Amino acid sequence: MSFVKLTASAIAIAAVSATAASARDQVQVAGSSTVLPYASIVAEAFGENFDFPTPVVESGGSSAGLKRFCEGVGENTIDVANASRKIKDKEIAACAEAGVTDIIEVRIGYDGIVFASQLNGPAFTAFEPADIFNALAEKVLKDGEIVANPYTQWAEFNADLPAADIMAFIPGTKHGTREVFEEKVLLAGCEATGAMEAMVASGMSEDDAEGACMAVRTDGKSVDIDGDYTETLASIDANPNGIGVFGLAFYENNTDKLKTATMSGVEATTESIASGDYPVSRPLYFYVKKAHIGVIPGLKEYAEFFVSDDMAGPDGPLSEYGLVSDPELAATQAAVAAEDTMQ
């Protein structure tokens, strides 16, 4: 994506010279594949408009990025971790154990998770969480009993869905998208079908039942994708019946190849996510190592630029790419400027 060079007045942030002594002069970022395109857009514009080198942005997944972030403090560790979920308590503990005690959490906006398929494939026009659960869960409720998933086609449990073979490509366990998929789709579907209640009634604890609800089948009908969304897209290209789980932004940039289904009767759009009507949406974040501010040149300036109105606002390039602007962006901007850390 190309950019017109922004003026200092347009971005309302002064480009300053790097004066801090450091063996590394580039900001280093890693993490979520969902946040990757946004961070790449910001990094490119930052390099063009500031007196700092363009930050290095890598993917790898939310969990992998946060693991690298929590390895310690110093020029041999990354400065920023992108994440499509909040950092977990156990990750905060791992950070603290390695000396990363001051973490700045930055919410950049919102994204939705869509269920998309080939343009010329079967007509998957509408889903409920119950449909995804019945298709992909390891165990389901059938005839009043919890059984190993017997379904091979979508129409077997919902006559409104096509008589097409079940084949789904879902984010692997290291992706933040996977956790949102598990909690907002699989778990919700488990509850809606009565499977959760039946599991607890059979003697399982609620925690164990939740884990069982989010376990996916391993017979080849649900395939984990550990790479980014381009790998999921390639899998769908090769499988006419395939359904893939994508972020809204990726889908919107591939409408020439994909069509999407509604979830609970709501289409995933910027408007439906901003209003909270679309049920499968999530906030996106990046985390900054405060100890590196003032040591790694341009780190704070990069963070402030990322959440500036001109980048993350409703009329900025991130919105054009699919990010749903945060209604509380001004508060985030103030928190970043003040270097407020997580408590």
Image: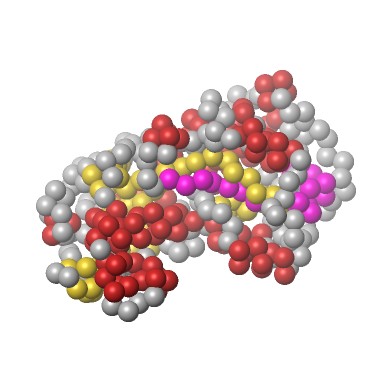
Region in magenta: 281-300
Q: Is residue 143 above or below residue 275?
A: below
The colouring scheme, among rainbow, by chain, secondary structure or one colour, is secondary structure
| Residue in view at x 72 percent, y 50 percent | 341
Q: Nearer the viewer, residue 332 or 29?
A: 332
Instruction: Please give the count of numbered marks on the rendered protein.
Output: 0
Q: Is residue 238 magenta?
A: no
* Residue 245 shows in the view: yes
Q: Is residue 119 above or below residue 130?
A: above
Please provide percent x and percent y for residue 172.
43, 62
Please provide percent x and percent y for residue 128.
26, 50
Q: Is residue 287 magenta?
A: yes
Please provide percent x and percent y for residue 95.
69, 64
Judged left or right of residue 262, residue 15 is right
| Residue in view at x 55 percent, y 61 percent | 63
Please provide percent x and percent y for residue 309.
62, 28
Residue occupying the far bottom of the picture: 203
| Residue in view at x 61 percent, y 63 percent | 89
| Residue in view at x 75 percent, y 56 percent | 102
* Residue 250 shows in the view: no
